[in-house]
Image: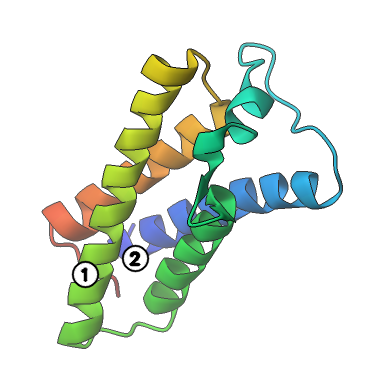
Amino acid sequence: MKMSAVIIILTILGILITSYIIYSHASNKKVICPSFSKSCNIVLDSKWSKIFGVKNEIFGFLYYLFIFTITGLAVSTPKIILATKGIVSIAAIYSIFLIYIQSKKLGHFCFYCICTAIVNLLLFFMIAIFNQSII
């Protein structure tokens, strides 16, 4: 399987997760957590769930949509590649920070947040570390 296909699959997973959270918040419904993770809403409603006043899932959705679009359109100019590496690096660092917050500050974990952190770290390793082409 081509690496671009794996990147597309990961971004679709991220889009689905963030879309579900966005939908739940927009419709004033609680996020339904898996039985082993009952703390999703505690994490998603915490003061750490926003940056610059915007919910993290909105940034996440836009991030995944950007990576999906760049990969799907096979855009590979040097500036786009550099920007993409920078963006996946920021996403990975922020994901690690949020896992730390869940662990040390909140004492609760969100299944969906952990899933998106894993997706972000995989995208980081594939694109920024292993220098895989996004096309």
**Count of marks, rendered view:** 2
Q: Residue at x 33, y 44 (%)?
A: 94
The secondary element bearing badge 2 is classed as: helix
Q: Is residue 132 above or below residue 43?
A: below
Placement of the C terminus among the 4 image quadrants:
bottom left
107 with respect to 80 (left or right): right
Expressed as whole percent of the image width and height from the top left, the position of residue 13 reads 54, 49
Name above or below for residue 27 compared with residue 134.
above
Q: Residue at x 35, y 82 (%)?
A: 74
What's the colour scheme? rainbow
Q: Quadrant of residue 128?
A: bottom left
Which one is earlier in the sequence, the residue at label 2 or at label 1?
A: 2
Location of the N terminus by quadrant is: bottom left
Q: Is residue 4 left or right of residue 62?
A: left
Q: Nearer the viewer, residue 53 or 57?
A: 53
Q: Report whether residue 12 is seen.
A: no
* Residue positioned most to the bottom: 77
In the rendered image, residue 55, in percent from the top left (x then y), is placed at: 58, 51
Name above or below for residue 33 compared with residue 5.
above
Residue at 23%, 55% in the rendered image: 89
Label placed on residue 29: none
Write down the residue under mark 1. 133
Question: How many other residues sit within 10 Å of disc 2, few (<14), some (14-19) or many (≥20)?
Answer: some
Residue 40 pos. (x, y %): 63, 26
Give me the C-alpha separation between circle 2 and circle 1: 7 Å
Q: SS for tag 1? A: loop
Q: Amino acid at mark 1?
A: Ser
Three-letter amino acid code of the residue under disc 2:
Ser
According to the picture, the residue beneath numbered tag 2 turns out to be 4
